[in-house]
Amino acid sequence: MDQEMSYGSDYKFIPATSIGSGVGVTVAPDVYCHTIQIVNIGLIGAPKSNEFVLIDAGMQGSADDIISLTEERFGEGSRPKAILLTHGHFDHVGAIIELVEHWQVPVYAHEQELPFLTGKTSYLEPDPTVEGGMVAKMSAMFPNEPINLGESVQALPSDGSIPFLPEFRWIHTPGHSPGHVSFFRDSDRVLIAGDAFVTVRQDALYKVLIQEEEINGPPRYFTTDWHAAWESVKRLEELKPSAAITGHGVPMSGDHLSNGLQKLANQFDKVAIPDYGKYI
């Protein structure tokens, strides 16, 4: 894992944050959600066990905070068995190179996401013209060029299994990105949904800042296939998750989650799909 890795040339620190930044929530005894600025990472594994994985890699400049968090939860010098990516947008891979270099661990993502993680293909540009609030209008400044993880990243197994997480399976949930995946544990129906849906209206700056709870579709400014996004939400709703960590917003559980997700699946065209935008 000593090959040279690189971020896209448009990568930069994004000075956006929320009242939830730095806050962690225990979703299950071995499932933990932590907010970095405006995005969530997940840690799956029993505390102090040194047997855990990291889900997503936060914002640029957050590597030291993520390392400190893992050592606080799992012990000094601990490192994950792997880093799993729901997808490769800038706010989910912002610290990944520093983390891979520090920990020397593999990264796994969906096969269709690999071109964006190996320097081959840029994401379509974010859409600042899409219907939405101030974050949508600011999205022209968000990076979309690919990062290059080289041989440090590999495809998730095609059978739906997840390395080092035998109780979980991955589910292809495209729409927000071509290779977006979610992770699900059947035994207790815990879901890590990434940006397939979120629990805050991510395009609205005020709601992001105060983290107002609201089950919504994927962030509008980066979602390019709304039909696939709707089908992905339907697929996740059919799982009847008991608790969910999403890429943005607070974790949800119980009736609040099930009722909101059912409404989103049934009324996605009214609730989530914007009235206008270049990817509509």
Image: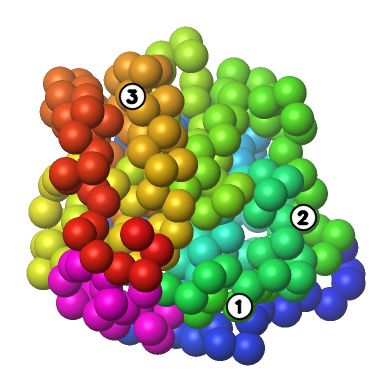
Dot 2 amino acid type: Val
Q: Earlier in the sequence, mark 1 or mark 2?
A: 1
Observer-nearest residue: 253 or 26?
253
Identity of the residue drawn at 36% across and 34% down: 233
Mark carried by residue 153: 2
195 vs 85, left or right, is left
Q: Position of residue 238 (x, y in %)?
A: 37, 18
Q: Using a 10 Å C-alpha cutoff, classify the residue at mark 2 as few (fewer than 14 neighbours), some (14 to 19) or many (20 or more).
A: many
Instruction: Say what secondary structure mark 1 lies in.
Output: loop
Tag 1 residue: 145
Residue type at tag 1: Glu
What's drawn in magenta, residue-wise?
Answer: 127-142
Which residue is at 30% across, 68% downward? 277
Indicate the amino acid at tag 3: Glu
Label 1–label 2 contact, CB within 8 A: no
Q: Nearer the viewer, residue 278 or 177?
A: 278
Q: Can residue 70 be seen in the rendering of this structure? A: no
Q: Distance between the residues labelled 3 and 1?
A: 32 Å
Q: In this view, does 211 lie above or below 141?
A: above
> Residue 180: horizontal and vertical position, in percent?
54, 46
Residue 233 appears in the figure: yes
Return the residue nearer the eye: 132 or 277: 277
In what element is the residue under mark 2? strand
